[in-house]
Amino acid sequence: MSAFVERWHKETSSFHLPIGEVTITLDDVASLLHLPIVGTFHSFEQLHVDNIVDMLVELLEVSAAKARAETIQCHDFYVQLSWLRDLYQMKIEACHWIVGMRAYFLYLLGCTLFANKSVTYVHVIFLDTLRDLTQIGTYAWGTVALMHMYDNLNKASKSTTR
């Protein structure tokens, strides 16, 4: 991965390789990952940390104290993937299926489509897409995943990034 990052040029959103310039397109995402590139776009709004805590309380049914402790530990807007995994197990054992599925899907999004360089955290803002589980299939996940990858490649290719 670091070899690709070294060859990434954010000005052209492409990799400069010995064979020429190569980029990843929406068609590539649809073909390789089988993710929809056409559909509804979720509008992710900038949230305050209190809104993040409220979202965790409402959608994952955790106490405000647990939600605040987790967000403080994870720098306000994130939760640990291990915390989500434990929460999923607890909710499934208690037969809270919908909440368990939200925790599982957020965990899955944090491990796959929206993974970041920490590989241990996921941004809570993605939880808002899981508010109504019947709508998950209507989102253009492939488009958002490609944008997320471009953003992370742009960040990773900076000389100041470790």
Image (spheres, rainbow, N blue to C red):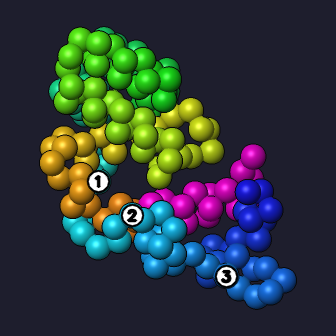
Residue 126 vs residue 5: left or right?
left
The spot of residue 149 in percent (x, y) is 54, 61
Q: Can you tell which of label 3 and label 1 is closer to the viewer?
A: 3
The region drawn magenta spans: 145-162
Residue at 35% x, 61% y is 141
> Real-space Cα distance between discs 3 and 2?
21 Å
Q: Sequence order check: which comes first, mark 3 or mark 2?
A: 3
Q: Which mark is residue 52?
A: none
Q: Is residue 64 visible?
A: no
Q: Which SS class for mark 3? A: strand
Location of residue 9 with respect to 135 vertically, above or below: below
Amino acid type of the residue that numbered disc 2 sits on in the rendered structure: Leu
Q: Quadrant of residue 90?
A: top left
Q: Residues within 10 Å of mark 2 (few under 14, many from 20)?
A: some
The spot of residue 35 in percent (x, y) is 39, 64
Q: Can you tell which of label 2 and label 1 is closer to the viewer?
A: 2
In this view, the residue in front, 61 or 34, is 34
Q: Which residue is mark 2?
A: 35
Q: Quadrant of residue 152?
A: bottom right
Location of residue 37 with respect to 81 vertically, above or below: below
Q: Which residue is mark 1?
A: 44
The quadrant in which the N terminus is found is: bottom right
Q: Which residue is mark 3?
A: 22
Residue 72 vs residue 101: left or right?
right
